[in-house]
Amino acid sequence: MRTEITWKLVIKNHCKFDRLHVPSARLSLFPSSSSSALVVKCSNNGSPASDEGSLKDILSGMVDERVEQLLNKEENKALLQGLEQASSRVEIAKRQLAEIQKQEAEARVMREYIDQLESKASEIAECQKEILEARAMVEEAELSLNCASKEMESGMSDKDKERLQSVIAASVSAVIGTLAELPISLSRVTSNTQLILPLAITFVSCALFGVTFRYAIRRDLDNFQLKAGTSAAFGCVKGLAMLEAGAPLELNGSSIVSHAFDGAVYVSESLLIFLFAGVALDFCIKLRILSPFPIERT
């Protein structure tokens, strides 16, 4: 609704009266349907500046009064309340937006910090993995070193034990063989000094036979052919060597028969000696005085 207000101003001065007509103005602030006319009379005693100030004061007071009337109306109160609520909601939304922006900034900083921590964590994990691999390699090297040292120690100890068993075998074989040779040598010599050479040869031959017998038989203790074959081989070699040391062979029947008989005797004596030595060694092995080759590891 619009209200039309006509302002009429009559200004009276010292000389004459004059009328000043103020053009009509249409204001949409006032919802009244009636129109009114206002006549303002100014005295001729004042100055133009004071008249203009009075006009402004009058207009300002009228506008304030009219605005107050509008605000006091019931239908406008609801609108004002809605406006106030909307303004408060806008302020709340602004505060919430500022808080959200602040939280986003903090979350962005926290995310960057988390990314840095994750990168550090990945680097630490890689370092730990390398450390574990190096530790595993060190443990493997230590294990292999320990195994090698144990094998060396066991190898050295086993070798020492094998040497000791070989010495025992040589001693047993040499003693038994020399005792078996003693009656045979006594039947051929006329003095005790002549016993030294044949007994020394028999001692050395039987010592070698004892070592060879242990390494040849190994753990095949029930193989009679192997045992007899070893003794026969040493007996044949020693008997033929004794035959070679005798008189030279001549191309006649008596010399051939004589050498054949002497060879048979020498070989038989040597076989007897080494058979006694072999039996003694076998007996010692079965009594566990002598250990066969190789020694069992416990």
Image: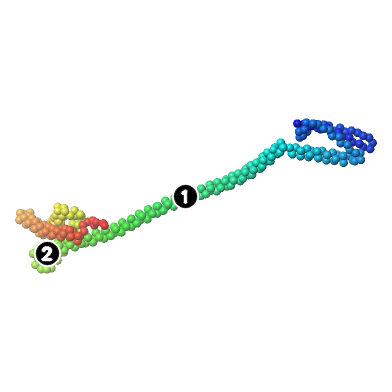
Label 1 sits on residue: 125
Q: Which residue is drawn at 57% across and 46% down?
A: 107
Residue 255 in sight from this viewpoint: no
Q: Residues within 10 Å of mark 2 (few under 14, many from 20)?
A: some
Q: In this view, does 264 lie above or below 100?
A: below
Q: Is there any visible trace of residue 104 in the rendered image?
A: yes
Q: Where is residue 29 in the image (x, y as percent from the top left)?
A: 76, 35
Check disc 1: other Cα within 10 Å, few if <14, some if 14-19, many if 20+: few
Based on the displayed image, in which of its 4 quarters is residue 138 positioned?
Answer: bottom left
Q: Nearest the camera: 126 or 232?
A: 126
Question: Compared with residue 127, is residue 21 higher up or lower down, i.e. above or below?
Answer: above
For residue 182, the mark is: 2
Instruction: Give SS at disc 2.
Output: helix
Q: Which of 65 and 265 is in front in this view?
A: 65
Residue type of the residue flagged with mark 2: Leu
Instruction: State the residue at coordinates (88%, 33%).
Output: 20
Q: At 19% from the left edge and 53% from the top edge, which residue is drawn?
A: 220
| Lateral position of residue 289 relative to residue 87, left or right | left
